[in-house]
Amino acid sequence: MKDINRLKVVLVEKKRTSKWLSERLKINLSTVLKWCINSSQPNLTNLVRIAK
């Protein structure tokens, strides 16, 4: 079964970039990129901010 990164899928669906998300959350772009490649996961606080 192929791993699916939901964050990456939603960014594509919404026609947004990782850079856009990092600017909105005021966090480092490299952090968002790690989330998008499943090398790390956002904490609960950031998940809530992403959902909003």
Image (cartoon, helix red, strand yellow):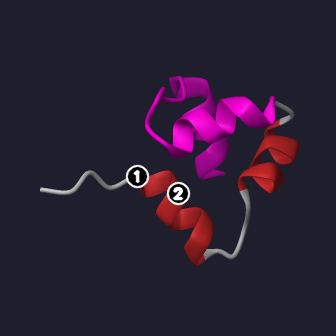
Q: Where is residue 26 shown, x and y percent of the image?
A: 86, 34
Quote the CA–CA distance across marks 2 and 1. Answer: 5 Å
Q: How many labels sit on residues?
A: 2
Look at the magenta stretch and give its main secondary structure: helix
Reading the image, the residue beneath label 2 is 8
Give the residues drawn in magenta, as a range: 28-52
| Residue furthest left in the image | 1
Residue at position x 64%, y 74% in the image: 14
Asked whether the beta carbons under mark 2 and mark 1 sit within 8 Å of each other, the answer is yes
* Quadrant in which the N terminus is drawn: bottom left
Say whether residue 45 is magenta.
Answer: yes
Inspect the image, locate mark 2, and give the three-letter code of the amino acid beneath it. Answer: Lys
**Image quarter of residue 38:** top left
Q: Is residue 35 rendered to the left or right of residue 28? A: left
Residue at position x 81%, y 30% in the image: 27
Residue at position x 48%, y 65% in the image: 9
Q: State the SS at label 1.
A: loop
Q: Where is residue 47 shown, x and y percent of the image?
A: 55, 37
Reading the image, the residue beneath label 1 is 5
